[in-house]
Image (tube, rainbow, N blue to C red):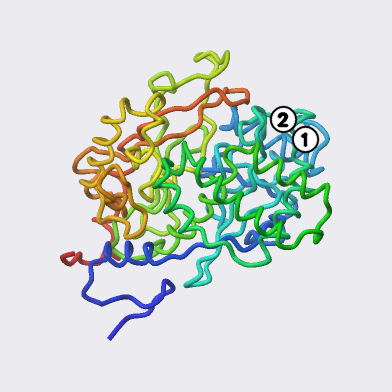
Amino acid sequence: MTATTSMGPRLSTKLSPNTIATSAMASVEPELVDVVSAIDTVPDMSANMVLVSGPIMDWEDYDGCQRGAIIGASIFEGLASNPYEADAGIRSGRIKLASSQDHGTVGSLTGVCSASMPVLVVRDRTSGRIAMCRLNEGGHAESLTFGSWNACVDSNLKLVRDVIGPALGHYVRMAPIALMPMMVEALSMGDEMHGRQNAAGYIFRAAIQERIIKVRGSWDNAAVHSLLGYLVSADFHFLHVAMAAAKVVSEAAADVPGSSILTAMSMNEKEFAIRVAGAPGRWFRTALPPISDVPIRLVGRSERELLGYSGGDSLLMETLGLGAVSAAAAPCMSPGSVGTPQDMSRLTESMYDIAWTEHPNLRIPALRQRGVPFGFDVDSIAASGLVPPVHIGATLRRGGIAGTMYFTPPLAPFIEARDYLRSSSAAVPDYSR
């Protein structure tokens, strides 16, 4: 006899909570089904709301990249005509701030998303559950994602909203695009799906091009030309697709009583935070370490003393065993990662010590096709002190991309989550695997 939950049928009432959680996540079949304005699909989104990555803070605590991005989004939506009006509107509550992850969506770096911005809608084919991520802004060094706001950023946002989003949505709606096969293939081609998702981008672009060819003349030629140019220049366009898929996967285990499986890692510009399956909707958070302590690979003329954290929900990729956790899959990233390709392989192999299982489909060729470490257990992390590391973009405090960084999250939230679960009256006994 099986027990039924919002995740679907459980395999057995005798299974441990962690096995239930990881089995639910592994069963998800994410597919891209639409590209529409946030106001039309994001749950409880309003015209005067700006979403940001990470747990929400008081407005006075935002003083870097995210502050600039929030002000820019407020002006873009016509909620304010200048930064002073935006600041006053936020302070008065006329402009509302909220965490993306509390509204079924996720955001890259600053994570800013406002009502008219197009979002990628990903659905689990099995359960029908959906999650979203704002469409990537394209191949620009300055963007709201990186905390920048100026006339060029405004112009590009309008292009993405008025041309790229509608054109991409037109071709996506023809038929759902299965994402797991793309991600499986991309891992075999040198991606780790966070710092590097070049192969996945090529595969996704080919899928859109095929649809364009099959229905030639079904959309405005100028818009199609812009869309194709975008898919070539926006190096990280697939990351946003993958982030929405990761959100759908993690939500499958977002409420499993007694489970200590990690379901989210995230940052705002001041804090690192996590969520676990057995404590739905609760953030366990701590201050970020000084950015001067983080290994960073700078590009261009960026200066280390000008760097600042910008937040980010893209740590979901590492939460699910991808990104830096699967560094062994992307040896070409060694200059910005933990070290040599051999070091990267050792890093990935060490992650199995804190993972509940391995993913049945996402596999790493360099490790003899072993499944990526899957279902990180906060009990094991707290006990060992071994934390899943992250490949993430480095930004300037006042906006702009500066390079890449290899970030090791602080241990404190994992210990707090472990202790919370142990003391919770709702805790469920853990059975053997």
Q: Are marks 1 and 2 in contact (CB under 8 Å)?
A: yes
Q: Is residue 219 left or right of residue 126?
A: right
| Quarter the N terminus occupies | bottom left
The residue positioned 51% from the left and 47% from the top of the image is 200
Q: Viewer-proximal residue, 18 or 25?
A: 25
Q: CA distance from mark 1 to mark 2?
A: 7 Å
The residue positioned 24% from the left and 56% from the top of the image is 422
Q: Splitting the image into 4 quarters, where does residue 255 fall?
A: bottom left
Q: Is residue 235 left or right of residue 273?
A: right
Q: Which mark is residue 401?
A: none
For mark 2, give the secondary structure: loop
Q: Amino acid at mark 1?
A: Asp
Q: How many marks?
A: 2
**Residue receiving disc 2:** 149
**Residue receiving disc 1:** 154
| Quarter the C terminus occupies | bottom left
Q: Viewer-proximal residue, 5 or 405?
A: 405
Q: Splitting the image into 4 quarters, where does residue 59 fall?
A: top right
